[in-house]
Image (cartoon, rainbow, N blue to C red):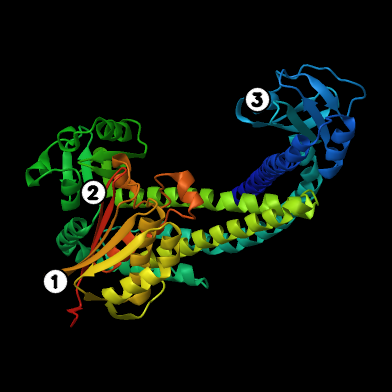
Amino acid sequence: MKKALIVRFLIVIAIVMSVCVVSATALLSSTEQNVRKSDMLTSLGLIKEIYEDEQEHDYELANRLSSLIGNARVSFINSSGEVFVDTYIDGEPGDDHSDREEVREALRSGSGVSVRYSETLGKNQIYAAMKVKNGDIIRISYNINSYLDFASMFIAPMLIAAALGIAAGIIAVSSVARQIMKPIDSVSDAMGNMKAIDGSDADSYEEIPVHKYPELDEFVTMFNFMRKNIRENMKTLENEREKERFILDSLQDGVILYDNDLSVISINRAGLKLLGGSEEHHSVSVPELVRKPELISGAETAVAEDKTVSLEASVDGRILMVQIFPVSKSGIDAMHGGLMVVRDITEKRMSEQLKADFFANAGHELKTPLTAISGFAELLENGLVPKDKKDYYIGKILTESKRMSTIISDILEISSLENKTVIEEVTECRLSEICTAVKECLEPAAQAKNVTINISGEGFSVRAAYKHIYELVENIVSNAVKYNKEGGKVDITLRNVGEIGCIYVQDNGIGIPKDSLGRVFERFYRVDKGRSTKEGSTGLGLSIVKHIVNCYGGTVTLDSELGKGTLVCVRLPIARLEDE
């Protein structure tokens, strides 16, 4: 056992060292390439504007652009793929680069990146190309380390670390192995003596002596105690079985035990419910119970190949995670079969998809203004902006930063509503006062488009945070103003319907297509993305409205017809009637 511990320890060290070298090398190589690609495309975006503003596209311009981006190799390629300027080659190169990957991609989609060995320079190069207005291609390239270059950096230090680790490990494992084996050997000798005694005389068993190790002391004490109480434990076996059945039936996960012939031996209530079975299915076969080819195949595989099978299946509109374990039991009641554990993961999968969509959309929405801010700022920093356009560029940076701030604020608002991380003071909110306040706030924007806002109907109050109700009304009315026609109108109507208060916001604006009505409450969804961006919309307004309404036990509906207008109806529980 001592030798086995030392050998396995050495094997583990070798494996860990190898994995570290390979992982670090691959990570550094991949990271360098990704960072290079991103930086090169950004640089191309900057020098592209300079290239388009210049009349002469010669070596002087290429060298100037090269110095701006860290003395990279700069090539000018025409739309036919012919190189007519290259900072690494004197004279007119005239090479046909139309077959280069980055050139083909730039001609097709506007930009392209590739990594390969350069025959001209005799080194690994990373290339990035971008198409300009006149159809030409600007290409830049840098030297890049190969996988072997990175690997060579780690060989020497890892060998030294491995040698030190092995030496220290051998000393430590040898010492620990000696200390562990001594008490284990004594316990083994004592147990061997116990086997030589006639088992019919239980009282004649010599107790195993205790040792200085607390873990072994506890084991020895428990072993001696169990020897004396086996008969008593047998009497309680039936009760324990009943407890097990109760526990199984209390589980939310389905548990199905079946034999080698796929006949069901035991199934709990959750298993019957999740698989759509009934009490009469307790003694049926797996194929009759599950009725899914993939589940039947998994049950057969677990038994035939003696391995665990994991899969997902859709049953009656639910997504189920199914794990099937092989089961083998020898002795009088020998059996061979499988244990199927079924868990409903429908909500988990839906939640994961919603989170994935949210992060993807949030990242995309934030990347657009951030890219614009970065690009304009770099142009200003490098002095590449004419004086007469400087105020324009600064204004664009300010506009995009405000847009990004608005998106972040809306994202945080939705997050706080979902998780209730921010506790707002609940008060009695009068809808007539809130609607009036919203109208006064949006009046300048409405007057700019010659849109009239009208408030009518019965007043009512709700128990909620004033901030939430104000934001709810403001988002709906703001959309009605933004997406209205010149000279249009927005009618806000309040109604009492029993214990429910209704807020109707009707406009005669541009309307929403029917195929978009089911998605308007989704995060970041915009019917007309170009117009929404121009109007400063984040695509989160109606999503915030829906979260606020759900937070206070209400409902929100939307009806619209393209070119004729939109009607939004919010229903909330009334706190009390106003005396108006």
Q: Residue at x 85, y 34 (%)?
A: 62
Image vertical order of residue 180 relative to residue 45, above or below: below
| Labels 2 & 1 near each other (Cβ < 8 A) | no
Q: Is residue 305 left or right of residue 275?
A: right
Q: Amino acid at mark 2?
A: Val
Q: Residue at x 21, y 40 (%)?
A: 258
Q: Amino acid at mark 1?
A: Glu
Residue found at the very far bottom of the displayed protein: 579
Image vertical order of residue 495 relative to residue 169, above or below: below
Q: Amino acid at mark 3?
A: Leu
Query: Of discs 2 and 1, which sits in the foreground?
Result: 1
Image vertical order of residue 52 relative to residue 493, above or below: above
The residue wearing badge 1 is: 499
The local crowd at label 1, few if under 14, some if 14 to 19, many if 20 or more residues have their Cα within 10 Å, is few
Give 503 or 79, whichever is nearer the viewer. Answer: 503
**CA gap, disc 2 and disc 3:** 59 Å
Task: Give the SS element for disc 3.
Answer: helix
The residue wearing badge 3 is: 107
Query: Of discs 2 and 3, which sits in the foreground?
Result: 3
Task: Give the SS element for disc 1.
Answer: loop
Residue found at the very far left of the displayed protein: 280
Give 327 or 504, whichever is nearer the viewer. Answer: 504
Could you tell me how many numbered marks the image carries?
3
**Residue 202 spot, x, y in % from top left:** 28, 64
The local crowd at label 3, few if under 14, some if 14 to 19, many if 20 or more residues have their Cα within 10 Å, is many
**CA gap, disc 2 and disc 1:** 46 Å
- Name the image quarter holding residue 206: bottom left
- Which labelled disc corresponds to residue 167? none
The residue wearing badge 2 is: 255
Q: Is residue 196 visible?
A: no
The local crowd at label 2, few if under 14, some if 14 to 19, many if 20 or more residues have their Cα within 10 Å, is many
**Residue 154 spot, x, y in % from top left:** 77, 45
